[in-house]
Structure formats: structure tokens, C-alpha cells
Image (cartoon, rainbow, N blue to C red):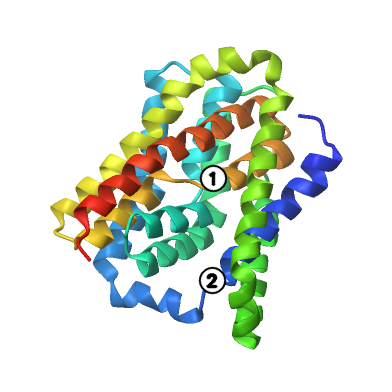
Amino acid sequence: MEQSILTAVFLPLALAFIMMGMGITLRVEDFGRVLKAPKAITLGLSAQLILLPLAGFALVKLFGLTGGLALGLMILAACPGGPTSNLISHLAKGDLALSISLTAVSSVVTIATIPLIVNLSIGYFGEEGSVMLPVMQTIIQIMGVTIVPVSIGMFIRSRNPRLTKMAERPVKFASALFFTLIMVAAILQERENLVEFMILTGPAALSLNLLTMGIGYSLALIFALPVRQRMSITVESGIQNGTMGIMIAATLLQNSVATIPIAIYSLLMFVTAIGVIAAGNRLVKD
């Protein structure tokens, strides 16, 4: 994807705005929950940071994806959860504090793991036209559109909690609008090949979503976590930050083909989320 105002300016700014919106819902205490619920946090992070990339790689091989399509799925598998996962977890009657903590911690950790996984994927799949990401530069760039705006949002909340409480709903609406526009732009960029790409990557993207949610729920069940924590780990394991993925593919790698699996996944995950929300409302007794 050639650099344009969309990929060079609007996309990073949109992601930064979305992450700032997440920041105004966070407090420093949310990070402290890592120590208070070590088993749940460890399981959730293990599913996100280790099992998710492994599942992504296995599905790439299983479905025979190559080039930019394979790279796009691996970028997605390297991304953390996002604000959308917190919303879905809330609607599914999950443990919202756990969901927010997992999103916050994974967003920090994946700053370092994303360039490593993406570079390994580029090297393995031999994707022509994609440059290897300089690790330190990429870490700084991702921090600039994730950690910095999240910190700004948290600071604003600490200084004026009443204002941020009033702003939460409009900011969430604007974030959803930006997210939708980003997906539409990514799809329009490759509209001539959309049907072919949907056939090629739709099953793999859907499988990644369902498989990782299944892994998350199974781990939480095996380790006898309460049902609310099970629902949160399920969602956090299977709902990734598609906006960040598209930003990495389109802005950092300038690879429009790699954005397609991410955009398709971002559409499909809302369909499966309906089922998760329905299941959560059946399983969780108020």
C-alpha cells in the first residue's frame, strides 16, 4: 500500500484516539490487579501472547495461505486485545476488571513482541515488498500510538474524573466510527480482489477467532476459574485489536494485501461475539 494521508496520518491518529478512549476508562489500580488475580492474568496472557501466535501459524499452514495473506493473519495473531474486547466482555457478563487488566498489560507487552513475530513471519513466508521492521524504531512507533495516548487518557481521568465520565460514551461512539472507517478503507483498497480474498482468508480468520476463544475458555475451565473470569478470558483470547493490525500492515509495512485478513477478521468477530454474549448471559447468574 503506497503511503497516503490515510495510512501515514489518519490511521495512526485514529488508533491513538481509540487508545486514548481506552485510557480514560483505566486507573493505575487496574494494573495492580495483576498481583491480586495472578492465575487468571497468567492464563489470559498465556493464551494471548503464546497460544494465539501458534494458532495463527498453524492455521496459515492448514489453509495454505501465502504472501501478504499469511503475513496479515500473523500480524493479527501478534496483536493484543483492544477496547472492543472490553465492551464485548462487559456485554457477556464477564469480569470487566480482568478484561481491562488483560488488555492493558498485553498492550504493553506486545509492543516488544509484535516486531519480533512480524519479522519472523516476513522471513518465513518470504513476503516480497515488505521490509523487515526495525525493532527499536517499531517499538517506539507503536508506543506512540498506544501507550502514550493511553497514558494521556489515564492522566485526564485522574485530573478530572467527572469530565471523563461524561466523555466516555461520545468517545466510544467516535472510536467505533473510526474503527468502521478504517475497515472500510482497507477493504476498498483491495475491492477488486475482495471476493477472492474472502474465500481465501475468511475460513482462516473465522477459525482463528473461534479456535482462540475455545482455547481461552478451555484453559479457564480446566483451572477452575469463576464463570465471569472464564468469559473474560474467552473474549480476550479471541478478540484482537484489528485497528492496530491494519495500522501495522498499512502504515509500517505498506502492504495492502496484509490488511485484508485483518479487516475480514474484524467483521467476522462481531458475528461470533453475538454468540459469546448470548452464552455469557445464560451462564452467568446475577
- Dot placed on the residue nearer the N-terminal end, 2 or 1: 2
260 and 195: which is toward the camera: 195
Q: Amino acid at mark 2?
A: Thr
Q: Secondary structure at mark 1?
A: helix
Residue 252 lies in quadrant: top right
Task: Give the quadrant of residue 118.
Answer: top right
Q: Is residue 121 visible?
A: no
Q: Residues within 10 Å of mark 1 (few under 14, many from 20)?
A: some
Say which amino acid is labelled 1. Leu
- Residue at image position (63%, 56%) is 173
In the displayed structure image, the side of residue 92 where residue 141 appears, left or right: right
Please say if 66 is above or below 49.
above
x 55%, y 55%: residue: 112
- Marks 2 and 1 sit apart, C-alpha to C-alpha, by 29 Å
Label 2 crowd (10 A; few <14 / some 14-19 / many >=20): some
Q: Is residue 96 left or right of residue 174?
A: left
Residue topped by disc 1: 116
Q: Quadrant of the C terminus?
A: bottom left
* Mark number, residue 25: 2
Residue 124 screen position, x and y as percent: 52, 27
Q: Quadrant of the N terminus?
A: top right
